[in-house]
Every structure is written in C-alpha cells, then in structure tokens.
Image (spheres, rainbow, N blue to C red):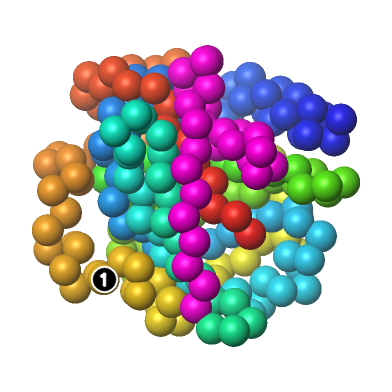
Amino acid sequence: MKAALLTAAFLALVSMSWVQAVWLGRLDPKQLLGPWYILAMASRAKDFMVEKDTKNVEGVMVTLTPDDKLRVQSSRHGPDGCHQSTVELLKRDSRWVYENPSLGVLDYRVLGTNFKDYAVIFTQLEFGDEAFNTVELYSRTEMARPEAIQLFTKWSRGLGFRSQQQAQLQKDFTCANKILQVGHLFRHHSWLPGEQGEPVALGEPSPKPVYSPWLCWWEGH
C-alpha cells in the first residue's frame, strides 16, 4: 500500500511541466553500462538521516547479462569494512522499468542523464513494513559536473525530499575503487558513447537516435 502511494506521487510529479527527464524508452542501455561513482543521495529510509554524514562514496559496475537482465555490482563501506554485492534486475513487460520484487525492489528508472558523464537515478523499495524511495547521483568521475549536481538537486527537491534527507557522500573512494579499478576502467571505457549528449525533457527527442528500453537500476541501501 505504501509503495503504491509512493508510485502515485512519483507519477504525478512526472506529469508536471517542469519535470526534466530523459525518455529512456529510446535510450541504448549500453550508454549507461560500466563504472559509476555514487556521489550524492536523497533517501526516505528511516536510518538515512542518522547515517548520512558517515556515508562514503560508493562504486557501481553495471552490465547486461546475455538474457538482458541488468547486473549491478556494488562496493560500499560497511561496519566491517568494504562490502561488495551483486544483484540482477528483471525488465518489466512495460519495457522501461527494471525490478526485482523478490528483493523488495519495485522500480528503477533514470530521471536524467547527459548520455555520457552522469545520471540521476530514482529507486522505489519496500522491505517488510518500510516503503521508501531514493534519488542518487551517478558520475563517471570523482568530481561531478556542475549541471549534474544541479539536476540532482532539482529532482530531489521536486520529489519532496527535505534537506535533512539529502547528502553529498564523503570523499573516501577506498571501497568504490575496489570494484571500479579506476585506473584501468576509465582508460578503456569502450562502453561509453563517443559524443557528448545533452539532457532532454520527457517526450522531447533525444540528442541522437536510440531505441532500447528505459535503463533503470537499483543499489540496495
């Protein structure tokens, strides 16, 4: 029930004219594969406001399996040091959402991206009696582009996250780099597009022809 209410609130916001999202139904998923840093986060999880000041930058590696599942490998700091995990997400029949309901992951979608350097990701989760959503800023580099930060802030505020529910993660890349192997990956990032893209609004044409379903994914927090 809580998840349904959160979904309704999100869809209502998407219908508003000020919303700037990417129509990822026409986005080639390969444009968002590969290594990402999670540099900022907004969350309604009950413990987030208490823990946010101690959260470090996380690392994520996104790949596609042969059967088109979205595989997300992550590395983040935990009580016992760096914690790595892998989750596979299933594509919905609606074509533009990935999910894994058995893990409590109900919705994964990209809110905005420039098709190259950054992406703003929305997730909706339900664990037991707790339902919440998150907005996260993903960056190819350790320093986010100014427009990426602006887009993340706009989405977080627009979706009703209070300032106490938002955080820029601590610049400790120890755990992130364990999975990203940055020195190698960013020199050999054959999955990245060759041209700089521009953010587009929902329903507007993308900067270049793209044809695959929405790419959406989740990192468990």
**How crowded is the residue under tag 1: few (<14 C-alpha within 10 Å), some, or many (20+)?**
few
Q: How many marks?
A: 1
- Image quarter where the N terminus lies is top right
Q: Is residue 63 magenta?
A: no
Whether residue 211 is visible here, answered yes or no, is: yes
Give whichever of 128, 6 is nearer the camera.
128
Q: Is residue 92 magenta?
A: yes
Q: Position of residue 152 (x, y in %)?
A: 52, 50
State left or right for residue 26 relative to residue 202: left
- Image quarter where the C terminus lies is bottom right
Q: Amino acid at mark 1?
A: Gln
- Residue at mark 1: 181
Q: Residue at x 12, y 42 (%)?
A: 194
Q: Residue at x 36, y 55 (%)?
A: 61
Give whichever of 114, 67 is nearer the camera.
67
Q: Position of residue 91 (x, y in %)?
A: 48, 26
Label 1 sits on a secondary structure element that is: loop
Residue 66 quadrant: top left
State left or right for residue 95 relative to residue 182: right
- State the extent of the magenta-drawn residues as a range: 82-111
Q: Position of residue 77 (x, y in %)?
A: 54, 76
- The secondary structure that most of the magenta stretch takes on is strand
